[in-house]
Image (tube, rainbow, N blue to C red):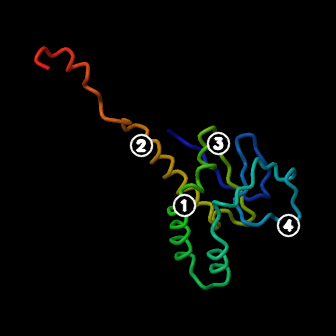
């Protein structure tokens, strides 16, 4: 199945093809009203932990280390992805950030992990829930 997950800065105007618009930042952007942003939801749980974000901002860790650790946070807490997965299964999803450059924000990492989790869940749905039952074959066998 194909899923459409876009990434935008909150300053970009809403478009009809955006689908569900979700702000994925820990902090609310100053001076912005919910109505002006045309948001469907504000979901903080999928954003990097405050500690991880602070370490990056203060230069304690590099962007590469941040990426590895954020992927680890998402991997260790898959339940944080569930609300976003539900939204994208219904239609297009646009992840919003207050960062000036969305491509340099954590959202591409989140998008990558969401797509991975969706493909993983889709693959699991193709597997049979239980082994096939052969009871009908036993009934037809006269020796059974």
In this view, the mark in front (2 or 4): 2
Using the image, determine if residue 139 lies above or below residue 31. Answer: above
**Dot 3 alpha-carbon crowd within 10 angstroms: few under 14, some 14 to 19, many 20 or more:** some
Could you tell me if the residues under marks 1 and 2 are in contact, i.e. CB atoms within 8 Å? no
Q: Which residue is mark 3?
A: 92
Quarter of the figure with residue 142? top left
- At horizontal 80% and vertical 63% (from top left) the residue drawn is 28
| Mark found first going from the N terminus, 2 or 4 | 4
Q: Is residue 128 left or right of residue 112?
A: left
Quarter of the figure with residue 42? bottom right
| Mark found first going from the N terminus, 1 or 3 | 1
Q: Which residue is mark 1?
A: 77
Query: x%, y% of residue 132?
Result: 29, 30
- At horizontal 69% and vertical 59% (from top left) the residue drawn is 24
In this view, the mark in front (1 or 3): 1
| Mark found first going from the N terminus, 3 or 4 | 4
Query: x%, y% of residue 52?
Result: 61, 75
Q: Which residue is mark 2?
A: 124
Using the image, determine if residue 128 lies above or below residue 31. Answer: above
CA–CA distance in space, label 1 to label 2: 19 Å
């Amino acid at each position: 199945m194909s899923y459409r997950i876009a990434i935008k800065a909150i300053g970009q105007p809403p478009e009809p093809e955006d689908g569900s618009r979700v702000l994925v930042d820990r902090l609310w952007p100053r001076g912005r009203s919910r109505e002006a942003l045309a948001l469907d939801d504000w979901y903080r749980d999928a954003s990097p932990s405050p500690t991880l974000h602070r370490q990056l901002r203060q230069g304690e860790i590099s962007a590469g280390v941040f990426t590895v650790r954020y992927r680890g946070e998402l991997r260790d807490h898959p339940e944080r992805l569930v609300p976003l997965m539900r939204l994208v299964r219904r239609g297009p999803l646009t992840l919003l950030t207050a960062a000036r450059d969305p491509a340099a924000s954590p959202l591409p990492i989140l998008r990558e992990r969401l797509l991975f989790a969706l493909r993983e869940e889709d693959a699991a749905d193709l597997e049979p829930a239980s082994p096939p039952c052969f009871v009908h074959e036993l009934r037809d066998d006269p020796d059974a």
